[in-house]
Amino acid sequence: MSRIIVSRNLLTNFRIINRAKFVEVARMQQNNANYSEYACKSMVDMDHIQKLRNLEEINPDTYRANFFGARPASARGSGVGENIYGGLLFAQAMLAAENTVDSQFEPHAIHAFFTLNGTPDKPIDYKVERIRDGRSFINRSVKACQNGNVVFTAQTSLCKKEPPSIEHQQEMPKVPQPDQVKPYFHEARRFLHENESGVRKLEDFQVKSLQRKIDEDEPCCVFEFRPIEPTKFMSLESWKPQPMCYWMRTVLPIPSDEQQLHRFLVTYITDATLVSAANTPHMSHSYRPSMLFTLDHTVHFHDHNYRADEWLLYENLSRVAKNGRGFSEGRVWTQDGRLVISTSQESLSRTKTEPSKL
């Protein structure tokens, strides 16, 4: 019988690793316990999330995605059909670019254009072109192709962490904390109940929209949303363009050592509400879009120290809409007030009824 020799250092390391794993599991269990009783009844698990970011390298610098999940409830709109959610294309393209660089390089700026709708019935191939490899900055161009067509392109810049030089930021908006705000689906149910009891009067299309989101979207949510002003967010009261804020976090805890996954998930969700920032004010004044389409999306990372499973405040604002295009901006804040991500987006809005001017 052969002897198994275990060194003291190896045994010590094994204990340290297992202790760290125990602490991580305990943290995740505590995080689970802290999730509100009102948290959306999502059926999403870690296997689902891992599939969203699973890219198979089929050729050098070419990665294939086969799983696309469902569109977030907040990203549903007229004319989207069963198309792949744009935020997922964006996050997967970012991941494809990251796969071609050393881990010390992290994305700091991505600008993408949506050229065609992607459909979930066939794979998407992300083809990465190495534009420049510098000592501090690296540039990548990514094309997402389906059926021989380019459906999405992204210019990505990645960099090493720079030494301190200049630093400033605006203050975080003063809004109620997450435990003072109800989840999106809880509020949707409340509004439907108030309509049935006669406390609130909803139009038929509003009832159908809220019920559809509950029936179809709640089970597949990756993120929980808590809008600060839910009646405006759901177009149940008339309002003009102004900053709109939402607390958001994943519906389940994410391991601490998966920082790339935290970045992937937050990037994924940044596309979900910016179209609404431009269109919902008009829809609250009876505007009915026949088509909404995201034209481009930009993300700047200021700080990578954040977690997707801890509350983040997403502030959205549309300053201008003209010539059928709405322009929206977003800012992502940690709960302790750090501005970690800035976003912007232009979207196309068409209607077969009366145009809207606010």
Image (tube, rainbow, N blue to C red):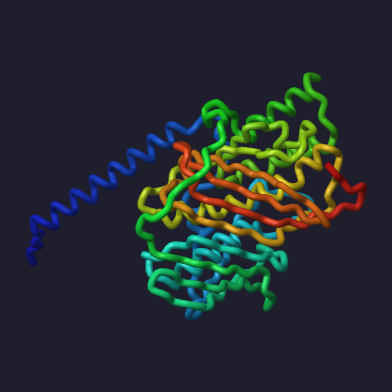
Which one is in front, 22 or 98? Answer: 98
- The residue lying at 39 percent from left, 48 percent from top is 255
Place of residue 45 in the rendered image (x, y in percent of width and height, measured from the top left): 50, 48
- The residue lying at 44 percent from left, 32 percent from top is 34
Which one is in front, 345 or 223? Answer: 345
- Give the vertical position of 229 relative to 267 (above or below): above
Split into 4 quadrants, where in the image is the C terminus?
Answer: top right
Residue 81 in view here: no
- The residue lying at 23 percent from left, 45 percent from top is 19
Which one is in front, 280 or 329? Answer: 329
Which one is in front, 38 or 273? Answer: 273
Place of residue 189 in the rendered image (x, y in percent of width and height, measured from the top left): 69, 30
- The residue lying at 56 percent from left, 75 percent from top is 127
Taking the view exactly as shown, the residue that stands out farthest to the bottom is 60
Place of residue 224 in the rendered image (x, y in percent of width and height, measured from the top left): 56, 40
Split into 4 quadrants, where in the image is the N terminus?
Answer: bottom left
- Give the vertical position of 259 relative to 249 (above or below): below
Q: Is residue 305 left or right of residue 216?
A: left
Taking the view exactly as shown, the residue that stands out farthest to the front is 166
Residue 333 in view here: yes
Place of residue 319 in the rendered image (x, y in percent of width and height, measured from the top left): 71, 47
Q: To which quarter of the image does residue 246 belong?
A: top right
Q: Is residue 299 left or right of residue 252?
A: right
Q: To which quarter of the image does residue 242 belong?
A: top right
Q: How many marks?
A: 0
Q: Is residue 208 left or right of residue 169?
A: right
